[in-house]
Amino acid sequence: MSQQGLARLAWGLTLLTLAIVAVSAVLVVANRATIETLDDANMLEIVLPIGFAILGGLVSSRQPSNALGWVFLVIALANALPALTDQYTRYAVLTRPGLPFSPWIPWLGDFTSTVVYPAGLAAFAFLLTPNGRLLSPRWRWVGWAAVVMTAVGVRGRDARWRGRAGPARTDRAALRRS
């Protein structure tokens, strides 16, 4: 892909992330009657993706070979999705019951947050600082350890979801308690 094509892709991912954040913010406003705390509003998952998306867009569009910019873009997108899925779940279950809903919606948000934290893409953001490359080949084992820990985390989240009639926090009582 050409330099110009990669720059367009970077800004496209940036705009997609910012659109997801905007929809999440609109859903927070729509859900305000059912939101009791700031944690219920997912403010961290609304604010963080804005900064990561803009920074990732700037770095990736100007230096497409720098892996750190692309990692920032994926972190931004993976941080924005849980806010959207949580707020839509709240909207479909509490605010306007009867809207289309699937247990896969909150599962997707839960999965994407596992890919970033604690050892996923966040670890790679630290490992690839400052120039988008590992400081030395001796750091490769840390990258592989992050991949293994992320795989274990994803498997643990999958086991947590398995065997339930529906996903966590999708019934009215559970949403009100959260």
Image: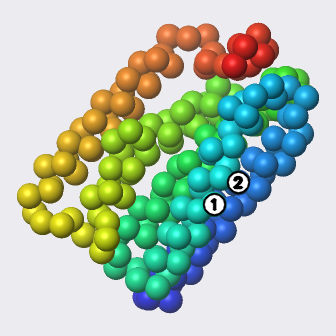
Q: Can residue 9 be seen in this view?
A: no
Q: What residue do we see at 8% from left, 58% from top? A: 138
Q: Earlier in the sequence, mark 2 or mark 1?
A: 2
Q: Compute the Cα span from label 2 to label 1.
A: 7 Å
Residue hosting label 2:
21
Q: Which of marks 2 and 1 is in front?
A: 1
Q: Is residue 178 above or below residue 134?
A: above
Direction from residue 135 to residue 151 in the image, left or right: right
Q: Looking at the image, which residue sits at the far left? A: 138
* Residue 152 rendering spot, x and y as whole percentages: 30, 30
* Residue 175 rendering spot, x and y as whole percentages: 74, 19
Q: What residue do we see at 72% from left, 14% from top? A: 177
In which quarter of the view is residue 52 placed?
Answer: bottom right
Mark 2 and mark 1 residues within 8 Å of each other at the beta carbon: yes
Disc ID at residue 50: 1
Mark 1 is surrounded, within 10 Å at the Cα level, by few (under 14), some (14 to 19) or many (20 or more) other residues, namely many
* Residue 119 rendering spot, x and y as whole percentages: 33, 42
Task: Identify which amino acid the numbered label 2 is placed on.
Answer: Val
